[in-house]
């Protein structure tokens, strides 16, 4: 399986012949390009035109984050799997109001399913307030009935927003750490440590899904729950809703409960609290390990990695758009 390269140091990314390398004052490190899926750049890294041409040729996305860990953009190479028929079907499902609303509601159902699964997982693993977690799962059970009669995407997003508020209300119970109180969701900028973790993790999830979209015939610019407007990408935001609870949120709970990330791993800035470089490295390392973990895929009858699950989810969306099979979001079975 191809690997993701994470660069935190300052330096230069260059091409030499048919090889990539990263160079700084500490020396030169060769990058095995044939084994590289995508590259995440967190440091101050210079690139050349020859480098960009080469990673485009090798079909490698490059995601950029600034000094503070904020996502700034992606070098998304020229599509190598262009399929006009698929793009037309994507556009048809967006322009057709009923089809778009149906897909948007499906993404919401999938997202709520995963949030519900996370709460149920921890319900019997906490020492207090289990009744509150039970109430939340009961409330989630009503969401599906609420979605059924909705006629607009905005209404579906509102239902998802209310469900997510209830979901976030469980975080303090699950974590049980006064240094990481949820308080309320704040993202731009995050105003406390837990929100900083959520925002950073979500950004990584969005870009990871984007890298997987690049390996399909789908166009990342056409989303359904998240409007196709002046933002460059939106389909990755839709699909990430399915995976944020089971990949990012569960990772956050694990990191905090095992004290792998602590209060000292955050920096206070003028208007925000952000993960320090050491905190980002720990988060990325553990997320990369989690993406390599395998789970049993009930329909394939074999185990696949979480990263592979994302690609399979995109194939399911594609089949739905082509009228081959209705899209049913992945449901965790643990």
Image: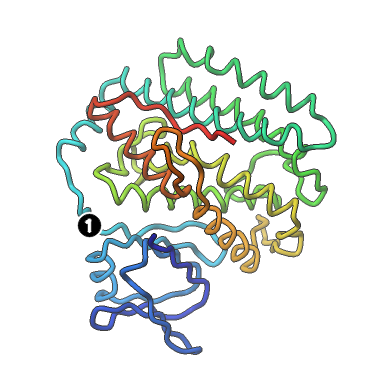
Relative horizontal placement of residue 120, taking residue 31 as reference (left or right): right
Depth check: give the residue in front, 224 or 118. 118
- The residue lying at 65 percent from left, 31 percent from top is 167
Q: Position of residue 263 (x, y in %)?
A: 76, 59
Quadrant of the rendered structure where residue 20 is?
bottom left
Depth check: give the residue in front, 62 or 152. 62
Mark 1 — residue? 78
Quadrant of the rendered structure where residue 41 is?
bottom left
Where's the N terminus, which quadrant? bottom left
Where's the C terminus, which quadrant? top right
Q: Is residue 209 above or below residue 286?
A: above
- The residue lying at 37 percent from left, 25 percent from top is 103
Q: Is residue 81 above or below residue 15?
A: above
Q: Position of residue 218 (x, y in %)?
A: 27, 42
Label 1's element? loop
Relative horizontal placement of residue 177, taking residue 166 as reference (left or right): right
- The residue lying at 38 percent from left, 33 percent from top is 227
């Amino acid at each position: 399986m191809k690997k993701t390269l994470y660069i935190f140091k300052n330096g230069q990314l260059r091409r030499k012949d048919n090889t990539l390398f990263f160079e700084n004052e500490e020396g030169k490190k060769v990058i095995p390009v044939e084994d590289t899926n995508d590259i995440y750049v967190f440091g101050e890294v210079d690139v050349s035109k020859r480098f960009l041409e080469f990673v485009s040729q090798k079909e490698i996305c490059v995601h950029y984050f600034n000094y503070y860990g904020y996502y700034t953009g992606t070098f998304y190479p020229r599509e190598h799997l262009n399929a006009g028929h698929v793009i037309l079907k994507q556009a048809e499902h967006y322009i057709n109001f009923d089809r778009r609303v149906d897909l948007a509601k499906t993404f919401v159902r999938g997202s709520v399913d995963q949030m519900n699964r996370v709460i149920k997982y921890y319900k019997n693993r906490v020492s207090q307030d289990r009744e509150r977690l039970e109430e939340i799962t009961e409330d989630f059970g009503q969401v599906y009935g609420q979605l059924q009669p909705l006629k607009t995407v905005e209404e579906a997003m509102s239902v998802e927003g209310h469900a997510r508020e209830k979901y976030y209300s469980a975080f303090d119970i699950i974590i049980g750490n006064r240094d990481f109180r949820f308080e309320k969701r704040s993202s731009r900028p995050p105003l406390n440590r837990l929100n900083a973790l959520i925002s950073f993790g979500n950004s990584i999830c969005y870009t990871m899904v984007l890298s997987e979209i690049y390996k399909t015939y789908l166009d990342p610019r056409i989303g359904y729950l998240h409007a196709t407007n002046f933002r460059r990408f939106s389909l990755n935001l839709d699909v990430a809703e399915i995976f944020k609870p089971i990949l990012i949120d569960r990772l956050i709970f694990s990191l905090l409960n095992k004290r792998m990330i602590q209060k000292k791993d955050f920096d206070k800035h003028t208007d925000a609290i952000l993960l320090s470089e050491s905190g980002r490295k720990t988060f990325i390392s553990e997320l990369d390990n989690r993406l390599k973990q395998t789970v049993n895929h009930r329909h394939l009858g074999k185990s696949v990695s979480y990263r592979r699950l994302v690609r399979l989810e995109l194939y399911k969306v594609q089949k739905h758009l082509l009228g081959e099979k209705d899209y049913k979001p992945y449901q965790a079975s643990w």
